[in-house]
Amino acid sequence: MIGRYGCVLLLLGVPGIIVAGAFSVEAYLRWHWESAASRVAIYSGARTVLQQAEADSSGKQIMLVPPNRWPQPITALHPIEVHLAREGVYIEMRQVFVDESGYFVPREGAKFKPLVGRGLSYTPLGNGVWWYHLAD
């Protein structure tokens, strides 16, 4: 297993040549989970979190979802935390000091218009899943 803060060494064998390179864990996570099937699983898990929250209706703006409430597709990601916010579900995959990134599934799906600013950016991955990055 790869640690969250390490890096992955990639070796490619070409006849007579070995190419080595390293890329960040964040790049690895995005590459690994960007297949359509994985995005569908992430989306499905996040929708389950949203449905559970609607049943609970605690009324909080941002709520930390405890690990025992994470559906299997989200648990399989081994996230740091899962947050439920007014705009959707944030699945935090990486955190270094005040820098954080991970998957985001909006409540409103196709109606979601990302508000970019204050160090927050969103990148669409497809199938209703976005990659978010927050840097203060």
Image (tube, rainbow, N blue to C red):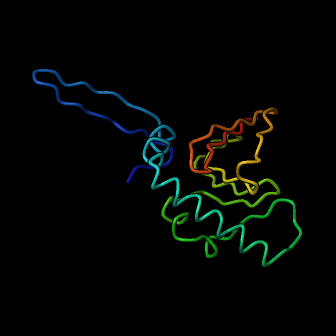
**The N terminus - image quarter:** bottom left
Who's the residue at 76% across and 33% down the image? 119
Residue 124 horizontal/vertical position (percent): 62, 40
Who's the residue at 53% across and 66% down the image? 75
Q: Viewer-proximal residue, 98 or 63?
A: 63
Who's the residue at 60% across and 57% down the image? 80
Residue 97 horizontal/vertical position (percent): 67, 42
Residue 95 horizontal/vertical position (percent): 62, 46
- Residue 102 located left or right of residue 76: right
Whether residue 98 is visible to the viewer of this picture, yes or no, is: yes
Residue 46 horizontal/vertical position (percent): 64, 62
Q: Viewer-proximal residue, 74 or 39?
A: 39
- Residue 53 located left or right of residue 26: right
- Residue 76 located left or right of residue 54: left
- Residue extending farthest to the front is 110
- Residue extending farthest to the left is 16
Who's the residue at 63% across and 43% down the image? 101
- Residue extending farthest to the right is 59
| Quarter occupied by residue 133 | top right
Q: Viewer-proximal residue, 49 or 111?
A: 111
